[in-house]
Amino acid sequence: MDGAAPLFGMEGISKRYGGVSALEKASLTLHAGRIHALLGENGAGKSTLIKIMSGVVQPDEGSLTFDGRDIRFPSPTAANQAGIVCVFQELSLVPDLSVADNIFIADPPRRFGLIDRTAQRRMAEEWLARAGAEDVHPLAPIKDLPLSRRQMVEIAKALARKPRILILDEATSALTAADVGKILAVLKRLRDEGLALLYISHRMQEIEELADDCTVFRNGRNVATYPAGSKSDREVVELMIGREYSHVFPPKPPPVPAATPPILEARGLTWTNRLHDISLTIRPGEIVGLGGLDGQGQRELLLALFGVLRGLSGDIRVDGKSVTIGSPSEAKAARIGMALIPEDRKTEGLMLPMSVRDNLSFAALDGLSKGGFIDRAAEERAVGEMLRLLAIKTAGIDVPVGTLSGGNQQKVVIAKWLMLAPRIILLNDPTRGIDVGTKQEIYQLLRKLADQGVAILFYSTDYDELIGCCERVLVLYDGHVGRELAGDALTEHELVSSALNMTAKPGTSAPAQAFGA
Amino acid sequence: MSDWRYRFAEHRGTLLAALVFVAMFGVYVGNHSAGFSANVVQTAANKGVLLALLAIAQTFVVLTSGIDLSVGAMFILANCLASWIVVGSPAMTALGVAGVLLTGLVCGGVNGAVVIFGRLQPIVATIASGAIYFGIALALRPNPGGDVNSDLADALTGQLWGGIPASLVVLLAVVLAIWLPFRRSALGRAVYAVGSSEVAAYMSGVETRRAKFAAYTLSGLFAAMGGLMLAFFTYSGEASSANAATYTLNSIAAVVLGGVSLFGGTGSAVGAIFGALIFRTINDLLFVFDLDPLWQPLFLGMVLLISVCIGSVRLLRVRNRLDLFG
Amino acid sequence: MSQDQAKPAPFRLPPVLRNIDGAVATAFACIVALLLIGSLYSSNFLSADYLLQQLQVGSFLAMAATGMMIVVLLGQIDLSVPWVMTVGAMMSTAAAGWGPAGVWAAIPIGILCGMIFGLVNGIGVAYLRVPSMIFTLGTNAVAQGLMIVRTGGAAPQDMATGPMRALATGRIVGGIPNAVWIWVLIGAATVFLLKRTTFGRSVYAIGNSERAAYLSGSRTRRVVVLAFVMSGALSAFGGVLLAGYSTKAYQGMGDPYLLPAIAAVVLGGTSILGGRGTYLGTVAGVILITLLQSILSIMQIDESIRQIVYGLTIILMLLLYGRSAALRT
């Protein structure tokens, strides 16, 4: 770091929620014209730090300085006025309005008191171009744009506020590989023009390319700040998880013999423009992984198998017999026995205000009832057993499931499906946003289930997980199966290059892609 | 070229409603014994303008993804109040008109305050406030009666040069003076934003509370305008609960027919006006085709039901069933 | 996704849980308060006779409110209550005149007609995904249209059957009106349905998150259709009872029941957004509204003041416990 005066600093920041400390005397310093990467596992305090920086939340103690002066941000508007702009991950775009309307939604150019549409449109085009999104039409409604384009508009919107500090909180997670490259170039150019950037990402490759300085947070504290590149990946990971980075995965048994008749087969699955001719085979006892960058069709593939998609062409066979699955209720039926742990547990996996018991028993309710009447005793037994089996920490079975921690919530989702004793389990990034301890428990659980003969299809954005849990990984690219990696070929390098659709270069090593997602 | 495509797509609902109305009205006039005469148009306009004003009122609130079940009550309240104070000398009459409109603003403002600061759901809040407003109307006019300044009434409900109904001109005037500038203003856009995604609007620094308050207040204003016009048509005030309920529900139908989404964020008051006119013309069509008046309510109901199902055709294009859920 | 393990303000659940009991408690407290205020006017208010009569009158509203509650729990609304009630009344009284079997077939036919409308509502909302507010508005208009055609717009002359009158006005058991017993029975069945059946569990689940319920393998569309069928049946049955009470059906007899039904459901603590509410609350809401209307009428308070008091009471009570969460983080 050079000796120039810092642009922005946070010192001794603490924030408590209830009895839990989100930040403990945390600190951070940003300099103009430098990109500062912020790393840490989920729960380390990065989100809270950003909320304090952007005025959404107030710290319990500590100070902020901007341009050398003490400052407070009592509201998001105050932070914006100081020149701090945040690109949100949960997009802040209004779906029914146009791109131009969204970029200037809070302070549009005016003429005679009304919005000057021509000026707004022209300015929008400029900012879209500066954000590398020239192909987005300023009059297009946001709801018609794919997720990656929306993210670029979000970035253009942030740039149009003319920030002095730009915060990007995993802003590239929805982007295609090509867009990521464009955005990185844009960010570097902004840095050269004097902008200070705070960049949060779990993609080490991007951080390596972008960052000037790095800070690692753990348990609400700044545990290390160092120039980018001065620490190895292993050291960084150890800083993040606070202990020696050792294997956290249960040992893998020898692969299931290929001659074993498969439980699930798919041939030539095609759906709109998101899935192209995908074929796969899963045998009982196998954990098969799905890899690749976000948005290459992994989510759609799982939904397709689970009966959620319409207009799916291709053949799906269970136990060798061709089946048509028209809905999740058909998929979970005994003759197929499929389960799906969905992507977003809060909106797709759980009914948050309902009790732990109601959520746990919901999928298996038919089996716990006779003629539509629920057998309460059987329900309680089953629920109790699941709580025990998965070691779910809860104050009771009648508390709302929304009060549980993220890890325990995910365990409830998994337990809900395990009550049905499924034979095929599909998982959509199950450990996203979960603490390390629970992750390990989930890995053990999956291995145990596989040993009992369950077939598992496991999509993850965490390459270590894929390598550690799966015997084979199908790397998807643009809706196709790019490559299938197994055995010795299942390495981070191969996963990364297949994800980027590059052919393997022997002898070179690429950094591990993702940690603690 | 693609600019026009986007602007067209944005107003699709309104244009469709306009088209349907023109077609229907054409059929109506074509089959009316008196043909396309000024009187035919004037009668149709007078009946249509009342519902149109209420439809505009409802539009403001529906755009914020709320609903205003008190528009009918505010309408009747304005009508009863007008039958008391819109009388006398031109100055008195003008004051009376201002008083009625102000009352509408206040009623709408109260609705807005209850929804925004009380954080009550619009549907129940406006049911309750509607009862209150109707109670006040009933207190004003326990029995039908009163009077309005007949010069003003005749002027606004009669015909202008060329046979153009004055009521249509009034409608056009308020649309030009209030709706169009509102729509183009930052506040108007904020109303759309709030209806489309209140969370995204809030996170982007949009003044969501101000936008909602404006929507409810304007709703009260336009309901009061409707009440005024009703007084001008009937020369009296009447606190009829049946009327209040009917106009409220009809305003919702008009708004939907006019392409405004009940989920908020899309649609236009202009579309709602056409929706109101369509609603009115259906009735008139039945009359013109000599349909047994006994069958008219059923026909009206079926047309309403079928037209709201037309939007479901888009479901055929849905490929991911998760998109069916909000 | 960057996320903290430590959550900001708890997921607002303890207050909500408190709300459900709070709502019911508040509603019952208001009922007691009303009775006390009324007793200041006349000691008759606390007499068993008066209370039973209120319960009897309230049972008609209760039918509509019960059906409405089930639909509201789903996150939907049923605005076809007014004319489906009237359909139930008119068709059952009409059936009474269809030969000797008519006397026994009257009530089932009335209910069946209500179920048909409920089925149409359910299909429109669940399969065609039309917002329930506008679709049920349409079916209400169609129901009205059908009845006008049937009756020629005049008041029907068909008489209610003996059983209908007995149900609505008789007192067979212990001096308590039959209508009240019916309410008790249907109420008990509803509580059982909501708490002890897979259907009931699904209703709450769909009201909380139709997406999550669907992905858990629930047949959400069937549940929605069934809920509307129940609402239609209950509304029609309410109409049947009303016809029994008035011995005849008449135009527009269901109109005064729509807004009070919605109000009763909401005052009882059921969220209009769906997913939470108890039947006990709806019972309290119905009694509260019935009492309120009755007391205002007995005190010979002018209709205009009655309306205002009615509206103010609803708003004030909702401000106590019906408020939504603020949008701040």
Image (cartoon, rainbow, N blue to C red):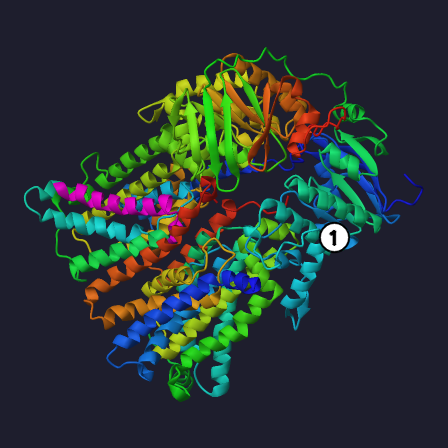
The magenta segment is: C105-134
Q: Residue furthest right?
A: A3
Q: Nearer the viewer, residue B19 or A386?
A: B19
Q: Inspect this view and state whether residue B136 appears.
A: no
Q: Which residue is mark 1?
A: A80
**Residue nearer the viewer, B216 or A191:** A191
Q: What type is the residue that disc 1 sits on?
A: Asn
Above or below A112: residue B196: above
Majority secondary structure of magenta residues? helix
Dot 1, crowdedness within 10 Å: few (<14), some or many (≥20)? many
Q: Measured from the top left, where is residue B133 in percent x and y? A: 43, 63
Q: Is residue B322 left or right of residue C151?
A: right
Q: Position of residue A375 (x, y in %)?
A: 37, 21
Q: Residue at x 40, y 18 (%)?
A: A377
Q: Nearer the viewer, residue C228 or C266?
A: C228
The residue lying furthest to the top in this view is: A254
The relative height of residue C10 versus residue C307 in the rendered view (above or below) is above
Asked if the magenta segment contains residue A396, the reply would be no
At a point 57% along the width and 50% down the height, the residue shown is A145
In the image, residue C131 lies in the stretch drawn in magenta? yes
Q: Secondary structure at mark 1?
A: helix
Residue at the extreme left: C100
Quarter of the rendering containing residue A484 = top right
Quadrant showing the C terminus of chain C = top right
Q: Is residue A68 above or below residue A384?
A: below
